[in-house]
Amino acid sequence: MQKKQPCDRLLKMDSKTFRKKIDKNSQEIGFLSKWNAWIKESDETTIALILRKSVYSNSYYLRIKINLADSENIKPEIDKNWIKHNVAEILLSFDSNHLDLFDLENNLIDDTGENDLNEIFRTELKQLIEKLSSKSGIIEWAKKEDMFLLPYTKSKLGL
């Protein structure tokens, strides 16, 4: 039997497998799959995770879209168009701190990339989503991260 060379162990993840891993991780942190995205609702927010593929490479972008409930805690209706378009009261990019994990052109050795992806979902993304699930958490996070908020969003946050 021939011994495997280290280069034989390099893995390139395909898009279908990658989407399944994102789906599994998103559901594990409380999101429901809906309209080709993952949705999580709290009393004060509706949060969507949206995975988009780059048209220029085999990279993906993970967008976080948030709509806020009004002063009577009535949330705007969401639909497929809200998912489809880059319009939201708050729109963030999660992948920018983890470009290597969202670039399928990277050759990841063994399960390292998958383990790293699982870990950032269980820790970093989960903590961020917990913070963004309430208006007070969004205000706190926006001040700490010096996030720009539109006047309409500021008024809904009571700023």
Image (cartoon, rainbow, N blue to C red):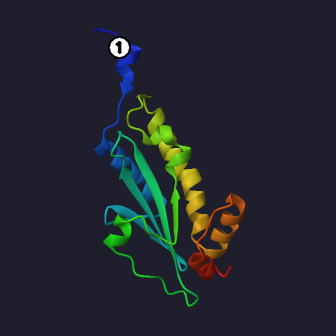
| Residue 156 locus on image (x, y percent) | 59, 81
Residue 135: x percent and y percent?
62, 75
* Above or below for 35 versus 118: below
Q: Given the image, on which type of amino acid does mark 1 rest?
A: Lys
Quarter of image, res 108: top left
Q: Which of 33 and 105 is in front in this view?
A: 105
Task: Tell me the residue at 67%/74% (across/down).
Answer: 136
* Picture quarter with the C terminus: bottom right
Q: Against 15, is 121 above or below?
A: below
Vertical order, 71 against 36 (above or below): below
Q: Is residue 100 visible?
A: yes
Residue that appears at 55% across and 55% down? 125
Place of residue 41 in the rendered image (x, y in percent of width and height, measured from the top left): 47, 73
Residue placed farthest to the top in the image?
2
Q: Residue furthest bottom?
A: 72
Q: Name the residue under label 1.
A: 4
Specify the quadrant that holds the N terminus.
top left
Measuring 34% from the left and 36% from the top, which residue is drawn there? 13
Q: Which residue is drawn at 44% across and 42% down?
A: 102
User: Which x, y percent locates residue 126?
Assistant: 55, 58
The quadrant where residue 83 appears = bottom left
Q: Is residue 136 left or right of residue 74?
A: right
Q: Can see residue 115?
A: no
Q: Residues within 10 Å of mark 1 (few under 14, many from 20)?
A: few
